[in-house]
Amino acid sequence: MSSNEGAKWLPRKDVIIIGSGWAGSTLATSLDETKHSITVISPETTTPYTPLLASAACGLYEFNLVETPIRHTNKKIKFVKAEVEGIDCKAKTVRCIPAFDDLSVKDFVLQYDIVVIAPGSTNNTFNTPGVSEHAVFLRNAKDAMKIASRIQDCFEKASISGLTDAQKHSLLHFVIVGAGPTGVEVSSELSDLFSSSYASLYPHLKPYVSIAVHDVANQVLSGFDTKPQDYAIGSFTKRNVEVLTGSHIERVEKNCLYTKENGKISAGLVIWATGNKSTALVDSLPVKKTPRNPRILTDSFLRVYTPSSELVDGAYAIGDAADVEDARLPTTAEVECQKAKYLAKALNGKIDREFRYQQAAIVAYLGQNDGVVSGKKDYSGPQAWIAWRSKNFLWTRTWRQKVLIVIGWALDLVTGRSIAPR
Ligand SMILES: Cc1cc2nc3c(=O)[nH]c(=O)nc-3n(C[C@H](O)[C@H](O)[C@H](O)COP(=O)(O)OP(=O)(O)OC[C@H]3O[C@@H](n4cnc5c(N)ncnc54)[C@H](O)[C@@H]3O)c2cc1C
């Protein structure tokens, strides 16, 4: 009898996974279904491939390529479209609110043997007035779609006759707040889009287009070494992307933002990419957390502690929402997938050692087939761009998507981006 046949006779454990992002979905697809009854609870039915979102917003990939549904036909994962509002660790239950406001059921409770908390993080606006109302974020395929449509609107508005030069300059000034890897990649993709497809579609507007990246810090690409950071600044200069480090955003209003250093700056679109803050669920949970920008603090087996440092029975935390004691790991998909795969192996009974993060290379795209790689070995230029493209391919999970990614690259070369077909 194989070990799987043996497992069929043991009662399966009810595993509830909170969140359908990189962490939750990787765990759900890696758990052994013969040993676990897996339920994912999330208000989102898909997992976004976040590293591909900036490219999708700028027309390189179709939007359905940059996310994948959590429900699988060949994997027994139960999915509940709801938000978890609270966890009762003694009763081993989670209280959920359906993600629909037209249902008679307003809340419900589910029982678990094991709960894995992976609700990720949300956009950090640093309480800057007007950001939520007037800036756009980039977290999922819907956001990417919104950015694509707002960019096009700016160009169409600026094409209406009768506008002054100053009005055209304002409409076609694109501001990215945050010069971390996400902000850098968004600005690079925008610069590619404007210098290629949009330059052909809107040749009359070329002299009016500008991109600026603002960051309160004094460098770009935090998390990378100094050499790639300097290289990125040089690359921005070559592409006429203005970099304003030490820039303090005071507020964002309709079609403009105000900085302490430069006062009012008119802009057609402000993309806010300044990092993460904890979710309402993590804020409300009575568990041990990191002191600043709270994340759930786990031991090296990814188990959750009470505030008085006792282990909570059957509770684990992974993803951006959690950090490992004494590890201070960055909030990246790379880290979150490693944690999820480790936890799946541990729960499947395949390993009993502690979690150890294997340092992976970090890659950022800089536009025009250029990039930087850091983490293991630093390098830049076309090789780094190839590394970035290969990673794009590796991030996708289904063969269908992998094939479509390669077709997307080929079509981009032959027929141009989907928004500007030849
Ligand atoms: C634009 C962008 C580009 C990026 N590029 C890279 C990259 O190139 N390489 C890299 O390594 N990392 C990258 N990252 C970082 C990476 O995406 C994150 O580290 C990763 O998404 C974290 O995964 P997660 O599952 O913890 O959280 P998330 O992906 O944020 O998922 C959390 C899930 O939990 C759900 N949820 C929230 N609250 C609740 C609740 N109360 N109840 C139920 N469900 C809830 C959310 O709806 C969501 O589905 C990028 C991030 C962004 C935004």
Image: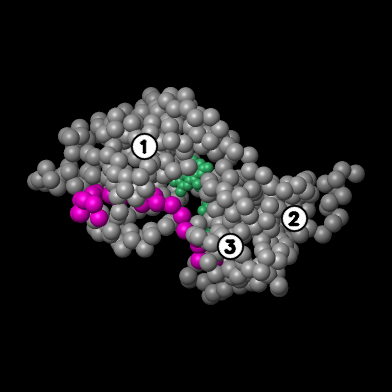
Name the mark nearer the viewer: 2 or 1: 1
Image position of 61 (left or right of 80) = left
Magenta-colored span:
260-281
Looking at the picture, tell me which residue is in the foreground, 154 or 265.
265
The circle on residue 171 is: none
Looking at the picture, tell me which residue is in the foreground, 259 or 22.
259
2 or 1: tag closer to the N-terminus: 2
Image position of 63 (left or right of 41) = left
Quick check: marks 3 and 1 in contact, CB under 8 Å?
no
The circle on residue 36 is: 2
Q: Which amino acid, by three-letter code, is at mark 2?
A: His
Determine whether 232 is above or below 143 in the image. above
Return the residue at label 1: 189
Q: Which amino acid, by three-letter code, is at mark 3?
A: Lys
Element marked by disc 3: loop
> Which quadrant of the view contains residue 409?
top left
Quick check: marks 2 and 1 in contact, CB under 8 Å?
no
Q: Which amino acid, by three-letter code, is at mark 1?
A: Glu
